[in-house]
Image (cartoon, rainbow, N blue to C red):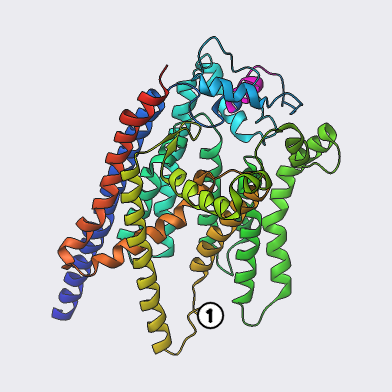
Amino acid sequence: MGARRNERRMTHEEGRRTVGSVFRPSSFVLALIIVAYLSVGTLYAVKTPAWQVPDEPAHYNYVRFVAEGRGLPVLQSGDYDAAYLESIKAARFPPSMPIDSIRYEFWQPPLYYALAAPIYLATSGSLLALRLFSVALGGFVVVLAFLIVRRSAPGSLALALGSAAFVAFVPQHVAMMAGAQNDGVAELLLALIVLQMLNLELQTASLKWGRLGLTLGLALLTKGTIYMAVPLVAVAIWLKYRSQSPRDSRWLVQRGVLAFGPALVLVLPWWIRNAAAYGWPDLVVSIRHDAVVLGQTTPAEWIARFGLGGYWRDFAVTTFHSFWGQFGWMGVPMNGRYYAILAGVSLVAFIGFIWYSNVKSQISNFKGHSRIANLKFETWILIFWVVFAALDYVGYNVKYVQFQGRYLFPALIPIGLAFTIGLRQWTTLLPRAWRDLALAVPFVGLVALDVVALFRMIVPALTL
């Protein structure tokens, strides 16, 4: 009886520790992060002058086209007038210069615009309502960031909360999520695809693989920049196949069909429509897009003006600046001291991440394992997530000069995880009681920077 009483008491204490020390604090802190994000995002949505989020007028015109019952638009010559766009940006979008002719996003897949059209109709075309819709979507991305890292590193609550805070408070990301554009839906679906992949096991029911395929299909109907989800799902299937012993090629084929079949069913009508509207083989409208958006600077032109060294210098510096915050249509950089601080913190995080990786490598070597061969499935997915996003960014800049760090935001969650790991590693030098507080300081600083950037940079620089 005494042993049983002790057993019951231990179970009760373990239950108290599990609920009291893990679930409740994590829920409170995550809720605090989300509330802070929604508050700051709403401020950006309200205070950022109209059309001063990149590409916002073109996205708005697409939503209006769908909401007015005109079907899906077709991108045509004249939808991108480079001279007029530069003029209206320089004039800060005055009422005397209409945005109606800015239609170069008419090539995009239709899902976001179909979702936004009812909001447009219910609010008589309110730009603010569309912006708040994007802010809300960004809140779900923050939650998914927490869940993905919690699944990838279940032993570290701090990493999950830090990654969620990173996604929530990078100033440029807040500015983009507070605009009327399709990035929120795209990031949400991509994160959901990753979470679904992380929850798949070899013997997972076929229904779950089919759900992954449906989410992939919705992603392909949202934005071209998340087509990287296709090779990412392929990598996941291959890694699961390679982990089998013995390997069954039928399993590989079946999972491929289950994952890609529903996606193809969803996206095929869109591709057929594009082939009819733009001609074969322009299924994703890349050929028509390149023919219409004339006037964009090419790498060859940039190198001719500034040299190869100047190209790579500008690529690196502008990418870094615009990842953290270069607002409006890239015309409102932050003060240099903020970039210097962010560069310092990023360097500290990078060194900490290398330090952490080296420690893990030494542990693996001590146990007689190859560090590469011993990487978990979750780690491989996060690595390929960053790799595919980086390749997509570099590929875009091979065609046009688009040094905009925001194009790396599809991989913001794994980037945030690496950033948080690096900072967390440095906190191991502190007493345990101070580590979480020390880790929170940089993210609180990002919230403060969000507010400073809005009221001291964006509003003064872009208001008519």
* SS at circle 1: loop
- Compared with 453, 308 (above or below) is below
Q: Residue at x 66, y 50 (%)?
A: 398
Please identify the quadrant where the C terminus is shown: top left
Locate residue 134, reporting x and y percent.
48, 33
Locate residue 240, reporting x and y percent.
60, 70
Residue indicated by mark 1:
373
Q: Amino acid at mark 1?
A: Ala
In this rendered view, identify the residue nearer to me: 261 or 136: 136
- Compared with 56, 94 (above or below) is above
The residue furthest top is 96
Determine whether, in the image, residue 245 is placed left or right of residue 21. right
In this rendered view, identify the residue nearer to me: 297 or 282: 297
Give yes or no for residue 43 being in the magenta stretch.
no
In this rendered view, identify the residue nearer to me: 43 or 296: 296
Locate residue 245, reporting x and y percent.
62, 82
Q: Quadrant of residue 207?
A: bottom right
Q: Residues within 10 Å of mark 1 (few under 14, many from 20)?
A: few
Q: Quadrant of residue 269?
A: top right
Q: Residue at x 26, y 46 (%)?
A: 444
Query: What is the magenta segment's predominant secondary structure?
Result: helix
Please identify the quadrant where the N terminus is shown: bottom left
Task: Give the residues in magenta.
Answer: 59-69
Q: Quadrant of residue 75?
A: top right
Q: Residue at x 20, y 66 (%)?
A: 12
**Residue 417 in sight from this viewpoint:** yes
Q: Residue at x 27, y 43 (%)?
A: 32
Locate residue 52, reporting x and y percent.
48, 26
